[in-house]
Amino acid sequence: MKFIEMTGETLGKIINDGELHVEDLESAGIYGNTIVRVNQHGDIEVRRHDNWDVVGGLLGEFNNRLREQSGLDWA
């Protein structure tokens, strides 16, 4: 599976209505410098001490939003 990794701050710029919100990010343990990744299905995963946890998902046309905000492509 391919992912785009970013910080929680970048993720906060990508999310839209109906997706995770700032309050939801914080309750999921995602802060500005938290490492997160999104797979090609839009699943948002947060890096924990010894694993990745799925905490939500992006909807709709998230592909371009991810690549534009992160400056990265799927790897």
Image: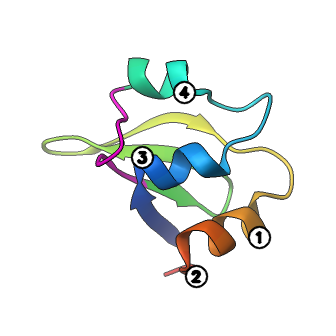
- Marks 1/2: CA–CA distance: 10 Å
Identify residue type, mark 2.
Answer: Asp
Q: Give x and y (percent) for residue 1.
A: 52, 69
Q: Secondary structure at mark 1?
A: helix
Q: Mark 1 or mark 4: name the one nearer the start of the chain.
A: 4
Q: Mark 2 or mark 4: name the one nearer the start of the chain.
A: 4
Q: Give x and y (percent) for residue 59.
A: 79, 44
Label 3 sits on residue: 8
* Furthest-left residue in this view: 49
- Marks 2/4: CA–CA distance: 24 Å
Label 4 sits on residue: 22
Label 1 sits on residue: 64
For label 3, the crowd category at 10 Å Cα-Cα, with few meaning under 14, some 14 to 19 and many 20 or more, is many
Q: Mark 3 or mark 1: name the one nearer the start of the chain.
A: 3
Label 2 sits on residue: 73
Identify residue type, mark 3.
Answer: Gly
Identify residue type, mark 1.
Answer: Asn
- Please report the residue visible at 58 percent of the width from the left and 82 percent of the height from the top: 73
- Please report the residue visible at 50 percent of the width from the left and 68 percent of the height from the top: 3
Identify residue type, mark 4.
Answer: Val
